[in-house]
C-alpha cells in the first residue's frame, strides 16, 4: 500500500517559483511539503551538484528555504485525484500526499524542432548542454556551435566559453531588428541589461548573428558540421558539438490532469495565481515563459495566497505585472520564424521514441490521429519532445494527459491498489 503524508500546502516543483512559494507559505505558518524529483532544490535554472555551491542568485532563497520549516519529498508526481491528493513516486515507494491546497510550479523544458541530422550523437539541446556542464561534463577544447532562439543562448555560450569550449558561432533565428528593439527596452531594466552584457563579454571573440538558423547537422558517426542559412545563402561550420534549442515550453501535464484551464500554452490564473480548479494555484513558467524574476514573484504570490495572506500577495502584484510585460516583449522578440517549419525533410524523424518520420504524417490529421496511425507521441517521453514540435509544424493541439505522468515501476502501480 502507498504511504500517506498529510500537509496543508503541497508545492510541486523546486525551481525558483516553487522555492519562493514554499518559503512564503511556510513563513506564514502553513504546513508545507515541497515535492521535486531532484535531490537538490534549484530546478533547471539553479541546477547544481550537491557538493558544489549553488549559483549566487540562488543562495539567499535556498538559505531561506532551509530555515522556513518546509518539508521535502524527493520524487515525481505520477498521478493525482484532484487538487487534494497527489501520488508521488519516491525511490521504490509510492507516497500519497493529502493536502488542503496545492501550488503547481512545474517549470518548463526545451522546445526541440526536427531538422536533418538532429538525431546524430553530440547534437544537444542548449539547456541540455548547460545541464551537462553543471553536472560535471567537460567541453574543454570542443568546437561548439550554438543555434536556436531566445535569451538562453547567451548564458549557455558564456558558460561553455568559460569552461574552455571553442564556441565558433551563436546563431539567433530572430531577425536583428526584433532583437535590437528588445535590447533597447532593456535600457529601462538596467539589471537585466548588465546581465546580458556580462554574458556577452564572456564570449566576446565569438560571432553572435541574428537572422541565422540551422538547416541541418552533418556527420557520419557523430556531428561534424552545422549547416546554416540567413535566408540568402547557406554555409557549413565544423563542430564537435551542436547545441540547438528553440525556446521553452511549459510543463503542463500535471495542471492539465488536474483540469486547470489552459490557453496560449500556459495555465490561466487569477490575480492571486489561483487556477480554475478550487484550491490549486500555479506559478512560474507553467503560466507563461517569463524568466526567474517573474517566477519568484508569482511563486511568492501563490504561496501567500495559498496560506491565506491575500493582502501580502496583492502587494506584490504590481511588480509581477511589470515582469509579465517584460515576458511579452521577450515572446514578441524571439518568435519563431515560419521558415523553421520547412526544416525537416520527409525522411527526418519527428518522433524519436517511435521512429516516426515526417513523411508518415498528414497535415489534415489531429494529434490523436497521428498517435493512432503512427504511434507518434506514444513513446517513453510521452510526447514531451515531439508534442511541441508537431504543434509548431502542424498546429496540432495537445491530445490528452493520462497517468502515470512519469515512468513508473509495476511494483509502484501495485502499491496504489
Image (cartoon, rainbow, N blue to C red):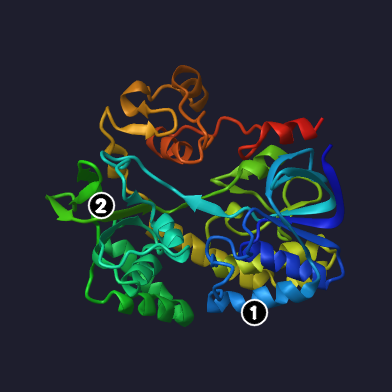
State which quadrant residue 411 falls in: top right
User: Which is in the foreground here, disc 2 or disc 1?
Assistant: 1
Q: Which residue is mark 1?
A: 60
Q: Nearer the viewer, residue 391 or 415?
A: 415
Q: Is residue 197 above or below residue 180?
A: below
**CA neighbours of label 2 inside 10 A, class few (<14), some (14 to 19), many (20+):** many
Residue drawn at x 25%, y 45% is 222
Q: Looking at the image, which residue is at 38% across and 25% down?
A: 363
Pointer 2 residue: 213
Tell me how far mark 2 sits from mark 1, CA to CA: 38 Å
Q: Report helix, strand or loop for mark 1.
A: helix
Closest to the observer, 124 or 121: 121
- Give neighbour class at mark 1: few <14, some 14-19, many 20+ (Cα, 10 Å): few
Q: Which numbered dot is residue 18?
A: none
Which quarter of the rendered picture does the N terminus lie within?
Answer: top right
Q: Residue 350 or 166: which is nearer the viewer?
A: 166
**What is the tally of numbered marks visible in this picture?**
2
- Using the rendered image of the protein, determine whether residue 274 is visible from the camera's viewpoint: yes
Q: Is residue 87 visible?
A: no
> In percent of the image, x 17 and y 55: which residue is there?
238
The x and y percentages for residue 281 are 73, 54
**Is residue 126 found left or right of 79 in the rendered image?**
left
The image shows residue 120 at horizontal and vertical percentages of 29, 42
Q: Quadrant of residue 107?
A: bottom right
Question: Residue 233, image x and y in percent?
Answer: 11, 50
Locate residue 270 relative to residue 215 in the image: left or right. Answer: right
Q: Are marks 2 and 1 in contact (CB under 8 Å)?
A: no
Disc 2 secondary structure class: strand
Amino acid at each position: 500500500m502507498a504511504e500517506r503524508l498529510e500537509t496543508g500546502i503541497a508545492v510541486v516543483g523546486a525551481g525558483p517559483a516553487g522555492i519562493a512559494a514554499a518559503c512564503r507559505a511556510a513563513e506564514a505558518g502553513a504546513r508545507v511539503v515541497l515535492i521535486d524529483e531532484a535531490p537538490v532544490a534549484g530546478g533547471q535554472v539553479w541546477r547544481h551538484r550537491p557538493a558544489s555551491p549553488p549559483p549566487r542568485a540562488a543562495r539567499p532563497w535556498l538559505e531561506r528555504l532551509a530555515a522556513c520549516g518546509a518539508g521535502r519529498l524527493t520524487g515525481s508526481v505520477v498521478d493525482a485525484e484532484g487538487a487534494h491528493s497527489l501520488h508521488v513516486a519516491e525511490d521504490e515507494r509510492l507516497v500519497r500526499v493529502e493536502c488542503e491546497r496545492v501550488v503547481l510550479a512545474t517549470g518548463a523544458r526545451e522546445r526541440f524542432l526536427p531538422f536533418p541530422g538532429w538525431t546524430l550523437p553530440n547534437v544537444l539541446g542548449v539547456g541540455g548542454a548547460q545541464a551537462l556542464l553543471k553536472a560535471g561534463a567537460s567541453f574543454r577544447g570542443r568546437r561548439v556551435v550554438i543555434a536556436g532562439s531566445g535569451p538562453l543562448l547567451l548564458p549557455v555560450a558564456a558558460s561553455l566559453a568559460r569552461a574552455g569550449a571553442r564556441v565558433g558561432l551563436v546563431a539567433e533565428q530572430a531577425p536583428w531588428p526584433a532583437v535590437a528593439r528588445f535590447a533597447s527596452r532593456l535600457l529601462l531594466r538596467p539589471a537585466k541589461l548588465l546581465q546580458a552584457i556580462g554574458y556577452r563579454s564572456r564570449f566576446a571573440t565569438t560571432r553572435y548573428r541574428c537572422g541565422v538558423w540551422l538547416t541541418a547537422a552533418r556527420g557520419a558517426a557523430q556531428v561534424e558540421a552545422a549547416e546554416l542559412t540567413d535566408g540568402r545563402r547557406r554555409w557549413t561550420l565544423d563542430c564537435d558539438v551542436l547545441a540547438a534549442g528553440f525556446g521553452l515550453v511549459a510543463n503542463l501535464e500535471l495542471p492539465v490532469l488536474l483540469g486547470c484551464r489552459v490557453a496560449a500554452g500556459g495555465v490561466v490564473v487569477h490575480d492571486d495565481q489561483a487556477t480554475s480548479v478550487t484550491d490549486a494555484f500555479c506559478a512560474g513558467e507553467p503560466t507563461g515563459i517569463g524568466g526567474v524574476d517573474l517566477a519568484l514573484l508569482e511563486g511568492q504570490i501563490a504561496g501567500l495566497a495559498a496560506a491565506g495572506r491575500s493582502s501580502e500577495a496583492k502587494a506584490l502584484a504590481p511588480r509581477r505585472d511589470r515582469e509579465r510585460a517584460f515576458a511579452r516583449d521577450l515572446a514578441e522578440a524571439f518568435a519563431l520564424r515560419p521558415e523553421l517549419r520547412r526544416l525537416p525533410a520527409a525522411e527526418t524523424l519527428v518522433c524519436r521514441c517511435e521512429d516516426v518520420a515526417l513523411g508518415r504524417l498528414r497535415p489534415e490529421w489531429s494529434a490523436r490521429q497521428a498517435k493512432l496511425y503512427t504511434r507518434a507521441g506514444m513513446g517513453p517521453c510521452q510526447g514531451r519532445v515531439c508534442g511541441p514540435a508537431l504543434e509548431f509544424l502542424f498546429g496540432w493541439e495537445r491530445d490528452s494527459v493520462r497517468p502515470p505522468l512519469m515512468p513508473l515501476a509495476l511494483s509502484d502501480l501495485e502499491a496504489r491498489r
